[in-house]
Image: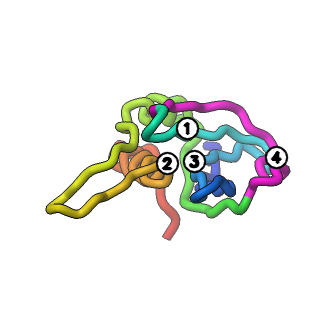
Amino acid sequence: MATYNVYIAEYISMPIFHNLLYIEFEPGKGRMYHVTGGHNVGWQYETREKDKIDDSIQFYGKHPKGTIAGADLQKVDQICRTVPMPRNQVLYGVPRNKDCRHWVLDALAKMEQQGVFKPSK
């Protein structure tokens, strides 16, 4: 059974980094899953084929996080669509600003809970 590598890819985006999930089907070919926008304009979920992610001038790096079985690939988009959009919160009087980086971690956690994502050790 085919398995695919799952990465968190980082892009330079002012004032912070932009993170996304990247599933690589073969070297240099894959699909990205992420949220774009922001708190002022609203967040939108996006997925699309993306080859050679490291060719972008804004590309910073990709970090291996685990694998996904080829049979579960269809489930990734379904799960990502259910991950809540980032929102700022105040917990016990402390502001907690959430963004695309938090969304990526939430998506990985949800995929792991549903048995789709197997983290690296």
User: Reading the chain from its start, which is encountered first: label 3 or label 2?
Assistant: 3
The residue carrying mark 2 is: 100
Res. 110 mark = none
Q: Position of residue 63 (x, y in %)?
A: 63, 63
- Name the secondary structure under disc 1: strand
Q: Amino acid at mark 4?
A: Lys
User: Reading the chain from its start, which is encountered first: label 2 or label 4?
Assistant: 4
Q: Give the distance between the C-alpha atoms of the residues marked 4 and 1, in whole angstroms.
A: 20 Å
Mark 3 and mark 1 in contact? Answer it, CB < 8 Å. Answer: no
The residue carrying mark 4 is: 52
Q: Residue at x 66, y 31 (%)?
A: 48
User: Reading the chain from its start, which is encountered first: label 4 or label 1?
Assistant: 1
- Closer to the observer: label 2 or label 4? 2
- Name the secondary structure under disc 2: helix
- Closer to the observer: label 4 or label 1? 1
Q: Residue at x 54, y 47 (%)?
A: 68
The residue carrying mark 3 is: 21
Q: Which image quadrant: the N terminus?
A: top right
The residue carrying mark 1 is: 36
User: Is 44 placed above or below 53 here?
Assistant: above
| Mark 3 burial class by Cα count in 10 Å: few <14, some 14-19, many 20+ | many
User: Reading the chain from its start, which is encountered first: label 3 or label 1?
Assistant: 3
Q: Give the distance between the C-alpha atoms of the residues marked 2 and 1, in whole angstroms.
A: 7 Å
